[in-house]
Image: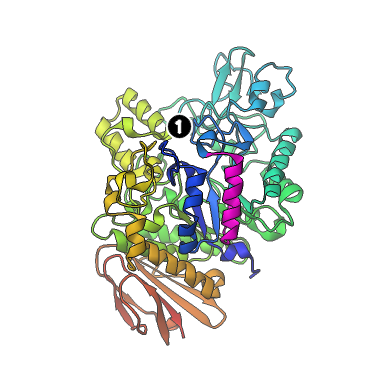
């Protein structure tokens, strides 16, 4: 196993709008991040992944960029950013920036030029097509509902936007576009960034001709994903990017890749292919969705599905590629509300979920507030929500009159992206200590009992448990480099597996239920083991039978 610093690292994602506000305008900012770097140093993380802080009109919370080389006014100045980087580096924390290059904002200078005339030298920076039979050029649906095309009256053509109509897709076929992106990446590398998280990077290569897709049942539109996910030239583009920008810089790179398989994951992450270090895949994030439906049609998690999926990726990339490990990010509901128990067993199940994930092979990602066991939020009214995906879905369904508003709200409580975006709960003062003003998005009312000040004081908190998991990773190579093998494939409540490195072995046993299942230690791993970490028992050797408490986790290491 080839050793690399980024395999041994733990990454912490900051969603700047919701992290910490320094000036009372209700919006998190860069100075707010600087004020909390000691907290991150205490937690022990190695890398911060910073969601976009570039200039943006904010149609999709910064993922619609109008200037890649400047900072959004609400977040501060380039001088603030430079100070933040310096202060991170001073504490031994690296910075991974978000790279959003499938699309720009429609207010980016390139797009303003592009739509000014069919003869503009920037016309070909984006994907323009004439209409077909009085309609859009094809039947693709936008990720945020409706057609993926927007008509421009001035030039009598449509432009492609897989996301919001204010996020036109860049034309990666154009060599000038690629060069612009590489120059921009070099600009940030020269400033001292340590890597990039690449937003929907496997969407940048589209199939030639942009053919129609198979219409979704009951809709005029097709997902179109067969024609823009993992497209024909994606590996050419990433290898070119690696050769021109990434290679030799020792950077950390991760590509967000919906619809990627382990076989494709190897193509993206095998070090001999010179593309990326790792990918974010989403298979485990789709397990509580009714098969064949969109994410709003939810169902309860079947643990066997989770074991199958996680094991498929663990074994699929073993020895060839590298996994990224995550439960949460800015697009996903809070994991303790999703796969855990956010009521009576909130603390216990948050620790169990952390154990199950961090003991696997791959680089773990912690999303802000996850280390506090923050939960989903239930706003009473749709007007409290801010997320474009949620609002579009709500309006579409209310207008269709297919579902009662209460049913739609239940879906939003379960799956809405704003669950992750409520402000970080720093203390029990008003607005959870996030801001002295009015927060851009309402703070979860449970901030009085769930907050960082309380967690830092309580040695049994979720925070201190995460801190210990991070420390263990630095002390034991087996947690980083050991091979993974699943136990009890069919058990409906227990997720157990081993890690093996040379003569060393780890046994990880986690209970995904409020019951007391019994785990019998298999013959092949009996022997002398000591307890490494647990959210239940303390110390002691490994018994041959373990009666698990609700949501319990134990990790034993061979002596």
Q: Where 544 falls versus 115 (above or below)?
A: below
Task: Examine the structure image and report whether residue 157 is included in the region drawn in magenta.
Answer: no
Which stretch appears magenta?
76-95
Q: Which of 282 and 4 is in front in this view?
A: 4
Q: Which residue is drawn at 67% across and 51% down?
A: 192
Q: Which of 256 and 476 is in front in this view?
A: 476
Residue linked to disc 1: 216
Q: Nearer the viewer, residue 442 or 220?
A: 442
> Taken as a whole, is the magenta stretch helix, strand or loop?
helix
Q: Which of 292 and 201 is in front in this view?
A: 201
Position of residue 317 in the picture relative to residue 450 (left or right): right
Horizontal and vertical percent position of residue 123: 70, 23
Horizontal and vertical percent position of residue 78: 61, 41
Q: Which residue is drawn at 27% across and 30% down?
A: 405
Q: Quadrant of residue 39?
A: bottom left
Residue 509 shows up from this direction: yes
Position of residue 266 in the picture relative to residue 307 (left or right): right
Residue 373 shows up from this direction: no
Q: Where 489 falls versus 443 (above or below)?
A: below
Task: Examine the structure image and report whether residue 82 is included in the region drawn in magenta.
Answer: yes
């Amino acid at each position: 196993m080839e050793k690399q610093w980024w395999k041994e690292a733990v990454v912490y994602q900051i969603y700047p709008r919701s992290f910490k506000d320094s000036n009372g305008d209700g919006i998190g900012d860069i100075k707010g991040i600087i004020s909390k770097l000691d907290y991150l140093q205490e937690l022990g993380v190695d890398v911060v992944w910073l969601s976009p802080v570039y200039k943006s009109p904010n149609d999709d919370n910064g993922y619609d960029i109008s200037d890649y080389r400047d900072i959004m006014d609400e977040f501060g100045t380039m001088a603030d950013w430079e100070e933040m980087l310096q202060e991170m580096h001073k504490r031994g924390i690296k910075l991974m920036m978000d790279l959003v290059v499938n699309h720009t904002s429609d207010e980016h200078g390139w797009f303003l030029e592009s739509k000014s005339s069919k003869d503009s030298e920037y016309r070909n920076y984006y994907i323009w097509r004439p209409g077909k039979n009085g309609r859009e050029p094809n039947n693709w649906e936008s990720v945020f509902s409706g057609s993926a095309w927007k008509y421009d009256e001035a030039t009598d053509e449509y432009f492609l936007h897989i996301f919001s109509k204010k996020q036109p897709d860049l034309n990666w076929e154009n060599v000038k576009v690629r060069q612009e992106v590489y120059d921009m990446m070099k600009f940030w590398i020269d400033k001292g960034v340590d890597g990039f998280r690449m937003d929907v990077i496997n969407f940048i290569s589209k199939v030639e001709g942009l053919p129609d897709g198979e219409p979704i049942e009951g809709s005029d539109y097709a997902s179109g994903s067969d024609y823009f996910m993992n497209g024909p030239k994606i590996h050419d583009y990433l290898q070119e990017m690696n050769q021109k920008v990434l290679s030799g810089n020792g950077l950390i790179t991760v590509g967000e890749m919906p619809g990627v398989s382990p076989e494709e994951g190897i193509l993206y992450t095998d070090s001999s292919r010179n593309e990326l270090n790792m990918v974010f895949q989403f298979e485990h994030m789709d397990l509580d969705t009714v098969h064949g439906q969109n994410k709003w049609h939810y169902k309860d998690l079947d643990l066997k599905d989770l074991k199958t999926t996680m094991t498929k990726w663990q074994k699929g990339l073993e020895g060839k590629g590298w996994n990224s490990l995550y439960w949460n990010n800015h697009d996903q509901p809070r994991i303790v509300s999703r796969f855990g128990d956010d009521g009576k067993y909130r603390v216990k199940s948050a620790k169990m979920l952390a154990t199950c994930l961090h003991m696997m092979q791959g680089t773990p990602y912690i999303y802000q507030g996850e280390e506090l066991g923050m939960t989903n939020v239930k706003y009473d009214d749709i007007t409290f929500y801010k997320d474009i995906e949620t609002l579009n879905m709500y309006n579409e369904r209310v207008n269709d009159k297919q579902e009662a508003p209460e049913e739609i709200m239940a879906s939003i409580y379960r799956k809405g992206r704003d669950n992750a975006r409520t402000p970080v709960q720093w203390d029990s003062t008003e607005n959870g200590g996030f801001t002295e003003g009015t927060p851009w998005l309402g703070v979860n009312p449970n901030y009085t009992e769930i907050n960082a000040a309380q967690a830092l004081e309580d040695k049994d908190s979720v925070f201190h448990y995460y801190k210990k998991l991070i420390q263990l990773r630095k002390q034991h190579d087996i947690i980083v480099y050991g091979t993974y093998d699943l136990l009890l494939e069919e058990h409906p409540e227990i997720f157990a597996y081993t890690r093996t490195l040379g003569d060393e072995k780890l046994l990880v046993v986690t209970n995904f239920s409020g019951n007391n299942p019994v785990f019998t230690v298999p013959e092949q791993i009996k022997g002398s083991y000591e307890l490494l970490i647990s959210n239940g028992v303390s110390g002691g050797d490994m018994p041959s039978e373990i009666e698990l408490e609700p949501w319990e986790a134990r990790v034993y290491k061979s002596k």
